[in-house]
Image (cartoon, rainbow, N blue to C red):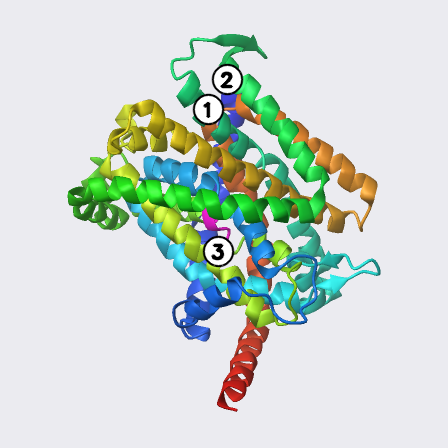
Amino acid sequence: MYDQINNLVLRADNIVWGLPLIILLLSLGTFLTFRLKLLQVFHLPKALKYMLKDEEGGEGEVSTFGALCTALSATIGTGNIVGVATAVVAGGPGALFWMMVSAFLGMTTKYAEGLLAIKYRTVDAKGHVLGGPFYYIEHGLGTKWKPLAKMFAFFGMFAGIFGTGTFSQISGITSAVKAVFDPDSVATVNFLGRDYSICVLVTGLLITIAAAMVIIGGLKRISSFSEIVIPFMAITYVVTCLLLLILNASSIPDAFYQIFRGAFDPKAVTGGAIGSVIVVAQKGIARGIFSNEAGLGSAPIAAAAARTNEPVRQGLVTMTGNFFTIIICTMTGLCIVITDAWNPLKGLEAAEITSYAFKTGLPFPAVVSATILMLCLSFFAFTTITGWNYYAARCAEYLSNGNKTFVKVFNGLYIAALFIGPYLTADLLWNCADVFNGLMALPNLIAIFLLSPIVVSETNDYFKRLAAKMGK
């Protein structure tokens, strides 16, 4: 029965992430890159500056940096550590190339999402900010497009509860903890008819309880938690990866060769294990969307709450999320390729792949390397759990027309899904996440394309005003 479900989800994954969606994602990113005149390159310094400084007199629920950290909390997680690993195993080193291409082009897509989130957000009588794809679809395209907004909210809700927000995140945490404390599954207990490490059971329960406490606190608690955890753990992880790369610097040129050769001639690198460029691109782009969320429609839900009145400014800040994920994903991928941890013959999966890379490439005892990864992955994944709950709960709120009981029931189901996550296989988890991510992205990508003239107009107007101000 389990194998049948897994095969069904895999077929759905192949359909959703077929050529049409891949072409749509890359085409939209390319289209916006040219229409916005390489904005992600020429205005990146300005975006990084805005990231740390709130706009004077801006209205919203959280700071600009807090909104970014909330978005990053849902982005920098297992997608950057485990997602990269599973992409390289499934598609070979070439998958990393396609991850980076989609992330670079996706910077303009994410810019458009952040801009539209501020332009079309609404504020209720209590000062509660409501924004995201459902609002820029409904208010930007008109009420006749409301079914598309409802479709986004429906798939977004399920992407949170069955995909990105719960199963894959808590599974990544429990597998990393198990790799440190019980790698050989010595201490096990029978649960639901299968034997599991006690580490998995205890960790899963503790994470579920901790997540419930943060989730109940709402956006401000999630934002405050993310502002502290994300910068610290991101720096720790980047420094660790840099150390591994410096110590294995002589292998970096060959790693890049494998990545670029594998992107266009996968058989030459994988020995025939990967059949075609389409498979490599599919795995790379699908995991790329999972890790950077460009085009998915999740980041603008957080961006809408930022204290700003300037859509373009928030669009630039939102865009930096992709910049940071490019850095972290590239480092993770290089570490995996250099140490050959991706080789399917090793039989590794999920967090085990990156853990093997750290154990092999760092000059520390294996337990120390595994512990560093465990801590980084656990904090990253935990913030992703809370960040995605915010996204999914907003989708539930829109879908139910603000019914608080419906949202509370949804949050209860979300927490229950966290408890179940560690007991599902890695392949099923990631395939589920891919399917719902793809379904969620489709209505959002259609809306961004239709609203792209407004994005270009707002951008040109902002920079004209900025130039005039600077000229005074």
Q: Residue furthest left?
A: 250
The one nearer the camera, 179 or 37, is 179
Residue at 61% across / 40% down in the picture? 386
| C-alpha distance separating marks 2 and 3 | 33 Å
Find numbered disc 1 in the image and state the secondary structure of the residue it sits on.
Answer: helix
Q: Tell me the residue that label 1 is attached to.
A: 177
Find numbered disc 2 in the image and state the secondary structure of the residue it sits on.
Answer: helix
Q: Earlier in the sequence, mark 3 or mark 1?
A: 1
The amino acid type found where label 2 is placed reads Cys
Magenta includes 80? no
Q: Is residue 42 left or right of residue 421?
A: left
Q: Is residue 465 left or right of residue 38?
A: right
| C-alpha distance separating marks 1 and 2 | 7 Å
Residue 193 position in % (x across, y down): 56, 9
Q: Earlier in the sequence, mark 1 or mark 2?
A: 1
* Number of residues whose C-alpha sits closer than 10 Å to that of mark 2, classed few (under 14), some (14–19) or many (20 or more): many
Please report the bounds of the magenta region as a residue range: 289-293
Find numbered disc 3 in the image and state the secondary structure of the residue it sits on.
Answer: helix
The label on residue 321 is 3
Residue at 38% across / 68% down in the picture? 41
